[in-house]
Image: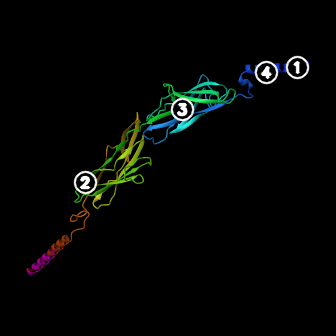
């Protein structure tokens, strides 16, 4: 019995020693595998102002502070992602194996598109890693966001870029119609304005890159207003349509007019060049038609009056009678 009691006290002492060692050792040393948790930090993009014709690609950076853990694909403590147009993306999963606070900054790269005002905000991201429910259990990572120049918590890292479209350039290239001669009735002249590429904007009323327009008599004729909204080089040809009106010789000149649209400081600028088909530079597009009457007694574009022919017949008949009478008188004197 004495031996049994001694063994009992010995067991109690061993159990007490084991409990003392457990209280001294850190919790992490007791786990079979190190605990870990992850977080994926998102970033959001929004565009204000005018609506861009094409979506821009925006660049964002997540930068680690003091060697904080980073997602895969990071280079020298920086992870870069892109968003095309409005929307959101994330920097990727970051894994944490130790309790603590980890700090990052989130920022956008200022690109060279002069139509945008880029968001200069820098966000401070603070990730706190703690026990979820109890010490030694599951860890949890919690993200806190604030602007670097502010103290208030932010719901998300939101960047807002403002897009301002430049003021469009409007042109209405005129053509000059000149007529040599004196037609009794003013003719109607038609012109053809044609784009050399599908990208060239056209006036209202165009069809398949061609606009026809007319003028009665000499003077200025206009194809209609053309609206340029983007930089580029836009070329057109301008010619006169041979309408086949009797008495007119039509001008066969073909002009090539080019509008060069450039952009500077968000404003469109325009310059114009105009050439004939042989390469001669001109300051204006002018078409000259020559008119010559097809008959002395007829009017252009109209049939001769029947009274005119009656008068001609009567005169001819009088001449014949006069000649016959004259011949008879001469025979009488023989």
Closer-to-camera residue (49/182): 49
Tell whether label 2 touches label 3 (CB within 8 Å): no
Residue 84 image point, x, y percent? 52, 39
Is residue 282 placed above or below 138 in the rendered structure?
A: below
> Residue shown at 17%/71% (left/top)?
311
Q: Which residues are magenta?
A: 319-332
State the separation of the CA atoms marked 4 and 1: 20 Å
Element at badge 2? strand
Residue mark closest to the camera, 3 vs 2 = 3
Q: Is residue 194 visible?
A: yes
In space, the residues marked 4 and 3 are separated at their CA atoms by 53 Å
Q: Which mark is residue 60?
A: 3
Q: Which label sits in the foreground, 1 or 3?
A: 1
- Per the image, label 4 sits on a secondary structure element best described as helix
| Cα–Cα span, label 1 and label 2 | 140 Å
Q: Nearer the viewer, residue 122 or 127?
A: 127
Q: Which of the numbered marks, if any, corresponds to residue 276?
A: none
Mark 1, other Cα within 10 Å: few <14 / some 14–19 / many ≥20: few
* Residue 72 in view in this figure: no
In the rendered image, the residue lying farthest to the front is 1
Q: Secondary structure at mark 3?
A: strand
Query: Tag on residue 18?
Result: 4
Q: Determine contact: label 4, label 3, CB under 8 Å.
A: no
Compare marks 4 and 2 and give the one earlier in the sequence.
Answer: 4
Q: Is residue 164 above or below residue 120?
A: below
Q: Nearer the observer, disc 1 or disc 2?
A: 1
> Which residue in the structure is indicated by mark 1?
5
């Amino acid at each position: 019995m004495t031996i049994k009691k001694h063994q009992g006290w010995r067991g109690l002492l061993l159990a007490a020693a084991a409990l003392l060692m457990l209280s001294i050792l850190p919790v992490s040393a007791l786990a079979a595998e190190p605990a870990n948790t992850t977080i994926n930090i998102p970033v959001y993009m929004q565009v204000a102002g005018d609506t861009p014709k094409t979506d821009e690609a925006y660049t964002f950076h997540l930068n680690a502070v003091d060697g904080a853990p980073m997602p895969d694909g990071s280079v020298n403590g920086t992870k870069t992602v892109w968003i095309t147009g409005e929307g959101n993306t994330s920097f990727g999963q970051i894994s944490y194996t130790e309790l603590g606070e980890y700090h990052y900054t989130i920022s956008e790269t200022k690109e060279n598109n002069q139509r945008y005002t880029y968001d200069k905000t820098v966000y401070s991201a603070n990730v706190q890693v703690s026990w979820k429910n109890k010490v030694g259990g599951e860890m949890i990572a919690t993200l806190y966001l604030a602007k670097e120049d502010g103290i208030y918590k932010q719901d998300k890292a939101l960047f807002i870029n403002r897009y301002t479209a430049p003021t469009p350039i409007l042109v209405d290239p005129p053509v000059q119609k000149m007529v040599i001669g004196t037609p009794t009735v003013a003719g109607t002249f038609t012109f053809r304005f044609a784009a050399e590429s599908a990208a060239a904007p056209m006036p209202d009323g165009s069809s398949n890159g061609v606009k026809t327009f007319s003028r009665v008599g000499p003077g200025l004729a206009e194809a209609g207003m053309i609206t340029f909204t983007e930089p580029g080089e836009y070329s057109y040809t301008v010619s006169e349509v041979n309408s086949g009106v009797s008495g007119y010789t039509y001008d066969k000149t073909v002009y090539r007019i080019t509008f060069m649209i450039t952009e500077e400081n968000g404003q469109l600028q325009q310059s114009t060049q105009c050439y004939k088909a042989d390469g001669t530079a001109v300051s204006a597009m002018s078409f000259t038609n020559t008119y010559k009457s097809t008959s002395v007694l007829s009017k252009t574009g109209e049939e001769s009056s029947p009274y005119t022919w009656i008068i001609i017949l009567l005169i001819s008949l009088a001449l014949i009678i006069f000649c016959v009478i004259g011949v008879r008188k001469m025979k009488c004197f023989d």
